[in-house]
Image (tube, rainbow, N blue to C red):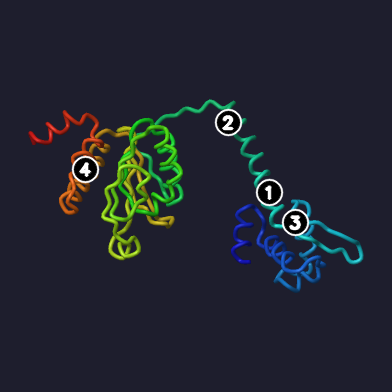
């Protein structure tokens, strides 16, 4: 029940309201006194809490002496929350249509927190037109699987390098197929992504708020990021015994010119 309470709090309920709702799920109909004894909610506050649940649509009351309370069934609650948030999002979308937003991209955007990094990663994938190049670990590719598959259906070419196992359906994969849990014992997961040779996201991919990344349109940084992935793929080709040229050419902006430049250097 604690997990349910935490999620309900995320949806805007107070801690006491979440406790009262889960208590009603266990035993209903129940009086305020009964809910108070099942939880640590004081009797002086329980009726305010229950009436708030009724007002929000999370519960109903029946009778008068004594008044008893019934929870909205979980299936009905899920439908109610889904529709409620859908309506709010639709209203927000309509409101945004009337706002002129100045979209100025600074040299570097700093992203903080794993969730924010993943959200930006998904946004970049969804906006990709031609090419996506990514170096990351299995968890991040699983997080973005839906977006990567959608990009692939749009005709976007996706080249992926990973030390961990990756779903082969996501694109052209180069992988050492190492166990991610074992790898985490010695390495901190990182993410490098270049989209359409213009947007680059680089940083740590720890599932904690301390994760940090940068997002930039700086061409020099994009070249460094792509060369880093090219090097990893080339070394993987040597160690795993496959020809990496096809993968490398797919990453380069102008394969013929770039290869000649590399040979001259």
Indicate which disc, 1 or 2, sits on the residue closer to the N terminus: 1
**Residue pictured at 58% horizontal, 31% vertical:** 96
Q: Which mark is nearer the camera, 2 or 3? A: 3
Q: Quadrant of the N terminus?
A: bottom right
**Residue pictured at 21% horizontal, 39% vertical:** 248
Q: Are marks 1 and 3 in contact (CB under 8 Å)?
A: no
Q: Give the residue number, with chain letter if any, for mark 4.
A: 230
Q: CA distance from mark 4 to mark 2?
A: 41 Å
**Residue pictured at 43% horizontal, 46% vertical:** 145
Tag 1 secondary structure = helix
Indicate which disc, 4 or 3, sits on the residue closer to the N terminus: 3
Q: Residues within 10 Å of mark 4 (few under 14, many from 20)?
A: many
Q: Residue furthest bottom?
A: 37
Q: Give the residue number, with chain letter if any, for mark 2.
A: 96
Q: CA distance from mark 1 to mark 3?
A: 11 Å
Q: Are marks 1 and 2 in contact (CB under 8 Å)?
A: no
């Amino acid at each position: 029940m604690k997990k349910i309470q935490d999620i309900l709090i995320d949806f805007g309920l107070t801690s006491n309201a979440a406790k009262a709702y889960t208590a009603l799920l266990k035993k209903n109909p129940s009086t305020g006194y009964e809910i108070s004894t099942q939880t640590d909610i004081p009797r002086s506050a329980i009726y305010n809490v229950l009436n708030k649940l009724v007002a929000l649509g999370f519960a109903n009351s029946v009778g008068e002496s004594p008044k008893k309370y019934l929870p909205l069934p979980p299936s009905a609650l899920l439908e109610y929350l889904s529709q409620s948030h859908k309506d709010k999002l639709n209203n927000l979308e309509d409101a945004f249509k009337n706002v002129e937003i100045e979209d100025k991209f600074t040299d570097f955007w700093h992203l903080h927190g794993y969730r924010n990094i993943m959200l930006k990663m998904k946004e970049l994938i969804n906006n990709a037109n031609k090419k996506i190049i990514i170096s990351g670990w299995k968890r991040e590719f699983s997080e973005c699987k839906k977006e990567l598959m959608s990009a692939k259906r749009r005709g976007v070419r996706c080249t992926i390098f990973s030390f961990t196992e990756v779903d082969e359906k996501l694109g052209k994969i180069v992988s050492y197929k190492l166990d991610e849990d074992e790898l985490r014992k010695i390495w901190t997961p990182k993410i490098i992504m270049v989209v359409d040779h213009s947007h680059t996201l680089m940083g740590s991919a720890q599932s904690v708020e301390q994760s940090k990344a940068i997002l930039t349109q700086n061409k020099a940084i994009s070249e460094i990021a792509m060369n880093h992935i090219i090097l990893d793929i080339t070394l993987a080709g040597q160690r795993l015994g496959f020809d990496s040229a096809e993968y490398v050419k797919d990453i380069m902006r102008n394969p013929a010119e770039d290869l000649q430049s590399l040979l001259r250097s």
